[in-house]
Image (spheres, rainbow, N blue to C red):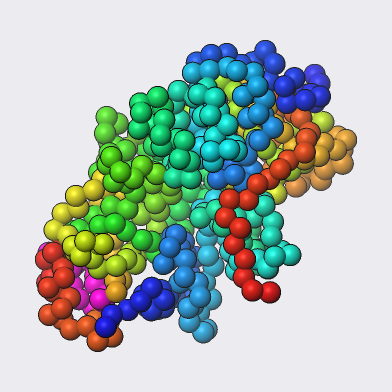
């Protein structure tokens, strides 16, 4: 089955619906599936629940879907860079379920690995633990967190082959592998698709079994905090 | 007299031990990397998926794919390795990171920590802080002793939503160094020119 699509719009065609749950890779604006986010905006699908560590900035990344008010709820660990997010949250238009960063990553990993829940120390004794089952193991308290299975996941990688085997680059890997595994359908965008057989099988970070649809495109790769030292 | 930001960071750097894997939070904790003592070799973890975090880049070295957990551009080193967020927090939760140095809004005398939200005012999120304080071997807080209104940030009980309960081991403030011990906080060290009376007068938490 052919995984490579011609455009981001084509890659999301037929798999988007109102009220759906999307898991997205990326940390800040690093390694975000920027082309697929634009395609989702252009599609106009609404009432989305999105699991993503951050919500982009006002004008870029997932912030684009906030501008168009396509998002109903976010599952995130940190949304501090986005004023629009704050406005929509405070006015009650947007729901947020804060997830500790490691818990969010593990929820995606677990969901993709067929694990419906896991116990963690993270958040014990805080508001995060409210309403969750608590259990003691070896004298320590843990809370039950659920695995995430999303309708689709959208991720960004550096290179892919035509089988969807992915390689990431530096810290742009972040949530992408875990997010990829937890979608019932995973759509990946990459900077370069190379012929099958041209990637070293030992250097593949995510096997193509997790990737259903694939596009190649030009990425802006915006930098949030350009910090330099004197040369 | 008291310590300034850089002196607090320099004091926090004295907590580092040779061979440690360490996570530094945003703000003053980031400055700690400028003061790593000679002969102490530590590896810095960035929870977005990197071990062996190097200094900020020069203009020519900037790479959009290489940032730290504060979203700042950084560089890699010879020892650097990259991994996904799930593995990053597996090593944090699994106790492989020896120490976290982070900022705080409030610390209570029993080691409770609040550093992620002010209801109705500041809604940003906890990021990786809850995972870090629950998972790492030792938690060192670096913060001002008092808030902007001059009220003690070392409290009998935290008033803000908690990041973790009983998680803080040591607190380094502009006035000195305190440890969380049975029954309250213990003064370990006074900042330059600060008297014990002055520190006591500025601390709400029980001092033992």
Q: Is residue A177 visible?
A: no
Q: Give the residue furthest to the bottom.
A: B193
Query: Residue at left 87%, top 41%?
Result: A198
Could you tell me which quadrant the N terminus of chain B lies in?
bottom left
Q: Tell me which segment is drawn in magenta.
A: B175-188
Could you tell me which quadrant the C terminus of chain B lies in?
bottom left
Query: Residue at left 14%, top 64%?
Result: B205
Residue B81 located within the stretch drawn in magenta:
no
Q: Position of residue A154 (x, y in %)?
A: 63, 30
Query: Residue at left 81%, top 24%?
Result: A6
Res B172 quadrant in image: bottom left
Q: Position of residue A174 (x, y in %)?
A: 59, 45
Reply above or below: B167 against B176. Answer: above
Left/right placement of residue B154 relative to residue B76 reads left
Reply above or below: A229 against B125. Answer: below
Reply above or below: A224 against B22. Answer: above
Residue B185 located within the stretch drawn in magenta:
yes
Reply above or below: B187 against A122. Answer: below
Res B168 quadrant in image: bottom left
Q: Is residue B183 visible?
A: yes
Q: Position of residue B42 (x, y in %)?
A: 52, 72
């Amino acid at each position: 089955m052919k995984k490579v699509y011609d455009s981001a719009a084509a890659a999301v065609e037929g798999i988007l619906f109102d009220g759906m749950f999307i898991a997205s890779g990326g940390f800040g604006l690093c390694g975000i599936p920027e082309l697929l986010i634009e395609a989702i905006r252009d599609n106009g699908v609404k009432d989305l629940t999105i699991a993503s560590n951050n919500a982009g900035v006002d004008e870029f990344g997932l912030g684009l879907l906030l501008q168009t008010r396509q998002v109903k709820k976010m599952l995130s660990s940190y949304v501090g860079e986005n004023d629009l997010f704050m406005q929509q949250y405070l006015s009650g238009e947007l729901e947020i379920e804060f997830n500790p960063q490691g818990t969010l990553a593990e929820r995606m990993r677990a969901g993709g690995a067929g694990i419906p829940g896991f116990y963690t120390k993270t958040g014990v004794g805080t508001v995060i633990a409210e309403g969750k089952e608590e259990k003691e193991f070896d004298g320590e308290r843990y809370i039950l967190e659920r695995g995430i299975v999303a309708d689709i996941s959208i991720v960004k990688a550096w290179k892919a082959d035509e089988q969807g085997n992915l390689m990431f680059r530096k810290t742009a890997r972040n949530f992408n592998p875990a997010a990829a595994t937890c979608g019932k359908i995973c759509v990946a965008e990459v900077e370069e698709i190379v012929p099958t057989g041209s990637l070293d099988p030992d250097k593949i970070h995510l096997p193509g079994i997790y990737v259903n649809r694939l596009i190649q495109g030009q990425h802006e790769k915006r930098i949030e905090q350009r910090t330099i030292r004197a040369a | 007299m008291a310590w300034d930001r850089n002196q607090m960071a320099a004091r926090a750097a004295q907590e580092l031990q040779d061979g440690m894997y360490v996570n530094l939070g945003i703000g003053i904790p980031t400055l700690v990397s400028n003061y790593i003592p000679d002969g102490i070799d530590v590896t810095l973890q960035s929870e977005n998926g990197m071990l062996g975090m190097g200094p900020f880049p020069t203009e020519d070295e900037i790479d959009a794919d290489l940032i730290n957990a504060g979203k700042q551009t950084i560089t890699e080193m010879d020892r650097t390795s990259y991994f996904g967020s799930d593995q990053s927090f597996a090593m944090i939760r699994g106790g492989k990171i020896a120490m976290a140095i982070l900022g705080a809004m409030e610390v209570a005398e029993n080691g409770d920590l609040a550093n992620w939200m002010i209801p109705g005012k500041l809604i940003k999120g906890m990021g990786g802080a809850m995972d870090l304080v629950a998972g790492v071997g030792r938690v060192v807080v670096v913060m001002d002793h008092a808030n902007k209104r001059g009220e003690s940030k070392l409290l009998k009980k935290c008033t803000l939503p908690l990041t973790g309960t009983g998680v803080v081991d040591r607190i380094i403030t502009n006035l000195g160094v305190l440890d969380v011990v049975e029954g309250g906080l213990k003064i370990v060290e006074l900042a330059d020119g600060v008297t014990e009376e002055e520190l006591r007068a500025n601390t709400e938490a029980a001092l033992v």
